[in-house]
Image: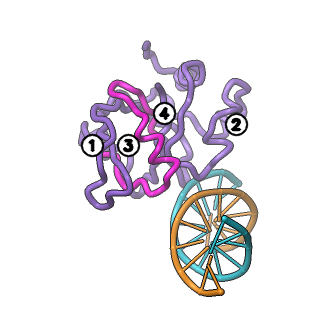
Chain colours: A purple, B cyan, C orange
DNA sequence: GCCAACGTTGGC
DNA sequence: GCCAACGTTGGC
């Protein structure tokens, strides 16, 4: 499956992710987002989206450990992700909005949901828009 | 179990 | 930095 993970670049940025390689995706405190985390499988790919001023998809990470209890709060879960690649060109929210094939993205309908799924076609479309050579 | 009040998120 | 939209909390 494919996902979009949102992060505030002032809190956790792609630059930091690139340096750490494998990280725990934590601090999810929303039940819908948590439930999506719990359905993730090893090998699932996630776009890394910067909120705030950037509002762009900038990279891809891969799920390397499925959901386990958040050590800070048993009601929530975390997953481990591994840095995969940087996109050649970031894909801005305005581009996503302007693309017919992406009009059903959860990110547009529920702007506050920090973890959301997308299908293969949507994943490939975003890869295409980013001008990145990446094959599944 | 409803819903008003409150807190948070994220686009603009 | 503002504020609309939405999720959560807690009193009843």
Residue at image mark 2: A97
Q: Position of residue C3 (x, y in %)?
A: 72, 69
- Nearest the viewer among A38 and A96 is A38
Residue at image mark 4: A3
Q: Which residues are magenta?
A: A23-48
Q: Is residue A74 left or right of residue A10?
A: left
Q: Position of residue A43 (x, y in %)?
A: 34, 24
A22 above or below A121? below
- Is label 3 on the same chain as label 2? yes
**Viewer-nearest of discs 1 and 3:** 1
Residue A118 sits in quarter: top right
Q: Secondary structure at mark 1?
A: strand
Q: Position of residue A62 (x, y in %)?
A: 35, 30
- Label 1 marks a residue whose chain is A
Q: Secondary structure at mark 3?
A: helix
Q: Which mark is residue A37?
A: none
Residue at image mark 3: A14
Alpha carbon separation for disc pair 2 and 1: 30 Å
On-image quarter of the C terminus of chain A = top left
- Label 4 marks a residue whose chain is A
The mark that comes first in sequence, 2 or 1, is 1
């Amino acid at each position: 499956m494919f996902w979009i993970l949102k992060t505030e670049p002032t809190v956790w940025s792609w630059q930091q992710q690139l340096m750490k390689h494998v990280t725990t995706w934590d601090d999810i405190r929303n039940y819908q987002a948590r439930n999506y985390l719990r359905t993730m499988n090893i090998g699932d790919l996630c776009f890394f989206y910067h909120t705030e001023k950037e509002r762009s998809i900038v990279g891809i990470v891969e799920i390397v450990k499925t959901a386990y209890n958040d050590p800070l709060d048993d009601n929530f879960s975390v997953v481990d992700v591994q840095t995969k690649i940087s996109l050649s060109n970031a894909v801005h929210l305005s581009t996503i909005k302007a693309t017919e094939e992406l009009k059903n993205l959860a990110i547009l309908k529920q702007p506050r949901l920090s973890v959301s799924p997308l299908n293969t076609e949507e994943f490939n479309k975003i890869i295409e828009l980013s001008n990145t050579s990446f094959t599944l």
